[in-house]
Amino acid sequence: MEAGGLGGAPGAADGYRLEAVADLRGVDALAGAWDDLWGRSGSPVPFTRFGWNRAWWESFGGESPFTVWTVRATDGTLAALLPTLPDPEAKRPGVLRVWANTHSFRSALLWDPAHPGALLALARGLRHLPGWWMLRIPYLVADDPAVAALRAAFAGEGMGAVTWPIMASPVYALQGTWEEALGSLSRRRRESLRRKQRQLLEGGKGRVEIVRGTVPDLGARLAQCWAVSAHTWKHRQGSSIAADPRRVAFYEGVGAADKEWLVLALLHLDGEPVAFEYNLLCRGVLYSLKLGFDERFAKASPGIVLRMKVLEWAFANGVATFDYMGNEADYKDMLSTYVLAHENLELFNANPRGRAAHFAKGRAYPAARAVYRAGRRLLGKGRP
């Protein structure tokens, strides 16, 4: 385990100690403490668990160096954790980002709110760390209190922060019964959904399977999901799971690590898989991670039919919330309660390059955009 203590004046704050873990053996040794912290954190989404992050690194980390920053209290309790690596998309050196990409869906700072001093120790230690000027943390829930606490800790050390709104994801709070949920839709919409379901499922042609947790043939079922993925519009664009072996390995790794949460749904037509959903059920929330339908059967709407069966299953199995993930869409909005705003967070070190970048992104760029929009309004080319 390669762990460097950054205690003393640079890293310690109110009895907390910042340490750096920079090899996989050391990361694996953190597994138990990592998940224990996850349980105590204020943002216990599945995407910050050890298993999720370990699968992410195996699939997407490559040969890049990395550092998992840990903050411990005087009694050894893990109070905060932040995995970082050099940003592979950055045009200049010195940019860090957390372990996240488009397959992360949502990230969060892993931090126990009972230890507010831990974030100050993290900020203070990173401020004195040479070689970086910006840290990116994407896919954050906008009103996550941990984000505000982290920004305050960095501001207390003279460092800056900028947030960028990126998307709003529909969320459905399940109440009442599935029949009552269908009854909330317009008559035309209800009849359309029922007609599609009859066409696919009645007469023995179509069959829906929804499995939860570990099943003996999980590998075969996942293979069927990837087979469907290879016949989607995303595959033509190169963004499907089946289009990249790293994506296949990642979702199989997550399924193995969090198998007790996996909810896998498949729609078969004449014995052939034509639609799938890959979801995780964590603390009463069913997260819709990946889904797809075979475009050859698009006229029959297998994706919509399967989604309705998954929601019916959620009502029947005591799910409290269905999180659609991703951006808004008509098929999501028709049964949703509210939207969850997401943002990207950029933190800037208190060195010359960090200060210049913070000024440019936090003040100069927004001011220039405001002038540009005002000019377009004066010319009658923009919205009032």
Image (cartoon, rainbow, N blue to C red):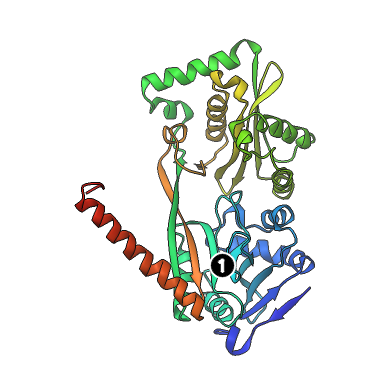
Which quarter of the rendered picture does the N terminus lie within? bottom right
Across and down, in percent, residue 40 comes to 58, 64
Across and down, in percent, residue 287 comes to 56, 44
Q: Which residue is mark 1?
A: 111
Q: Is residue 17 above or below residue 199?
A: below
Residue with the most extreme front position: 379
Across and down, in percent, residue 25 comes to 79, 67
* Residue at 64% in and 35% down: 235
| Residue 40 shows in the view | yes
Q: Quadrant of residue 316?
A: top right
| Residue 350 shows in the view | no
Q: Quadrant of residue 142?
A: bottom left
Q: Nearer the viewer, residue 239 or 7?
A: 239
Q: Quadrant of residue 294?
A: top right
* Residue at 71% in and 30% down: 227
Residue with the most extreme top position: 203
Q: Is residue 367 left or right of residue 112?
A: left
Tag 1's secondary structure? strand
* Residue at 41% in and 72% down: 359
Across and down, in percent, residue 185 comes to 39, 26
Q: Is residue 75 left or right of residue 107?
A: right
